[in-house]
């Protein structure tokens, strides 16, 4: 059985692919967050980027609706700045878990 450290450092392994994708999503989330109005920042975050579609989770339908209204403006902003390789924004409601 291979150690976790070996799996993490093996540049051709699936775990390393997931780690790189996670780091990429973290960078995209930062760009996304910096683009949002203050009121939305704590309620929306990037979940994934696949096939030039940015998947964003919002903690309620209220914030999801506000984000959908801003979608075309955000997409245009990112394309002009070449900040993100995104052509579409998909917003999903994922309520925060209460502990």
Image: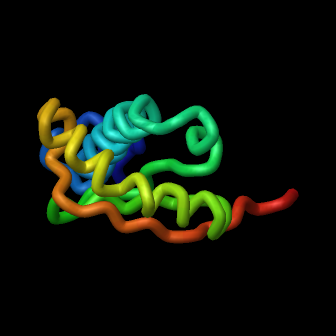
Q: Which x, y percent locates residue 35?
A: 39, 34
Q: Which x, y percent locates residue 22?
A: 36, 45
Locate residue 60 relative to residue 89 in the image: left or right.
Answer: right
Q: Residue at x 49, y 70 (%)?
A: 92
Colour style of the rendered protein structure: rainbow
**Front-most of 13 and 93?**
93
Locate residue 93 relative to residue 18 in the image: left or right.
Answer: right
**Front-most of 11 and 84?**
84
Q: Which x, y percent locates residue 16?
A: 26, 45
Q: Quadrant of the N terminus?
A: bottom left
Q: Residue at x 35, y 56 (%)?
A: 71
Q: Residue at x 20, y 46 (%)?
A: 76
Q: Against 33, is 56 above or below?
A: below
**Front-most of 25 and 37?**
37
Quadrant position of residue 94: bottom right
Q: Residue at x 39, y 38 (%)?
A: 26
Locate residue 34 relative to residue 27 in the image: left or right.
Answer: right
Residue 18 is at least partly visible in this image: yes
**Front-most of 95 and 82?**
82
Quadrant position of residue 28: top left
Q: Against 57, is 34 above or below?
A: above
Q: Which x, y percent locates residue 47?
A: 43, 56
Q: Quadrant of the C terminus?
A: bottom right
For the image, the number of numbered tags is 0
Residue 10 is at least partly visible in this image: no
Q: Against 57, is 15 above or below?
A: above
């Amino acid at each position: 059985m291979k150690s976790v450290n070996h799996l993490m450092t093996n540049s051709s392994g699936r775990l390393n692919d997931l780690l790189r994708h996670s780091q990429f999503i973290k960078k995209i989330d930062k760009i996304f967050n910096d683009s949002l109005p203050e009121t939305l920042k704590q309620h929306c975050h990037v979940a994934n980027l696949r096939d030039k579609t940015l998947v964003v989770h919002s903690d309620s339908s209220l914030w999801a609706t506000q984000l959908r209204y801003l979608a075309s403006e955000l997409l245009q902003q990112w394309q002009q700045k070449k900040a993100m390789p995104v052509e579409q924004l998909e917003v999903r409601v994922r309520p925060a878990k209460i502990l």
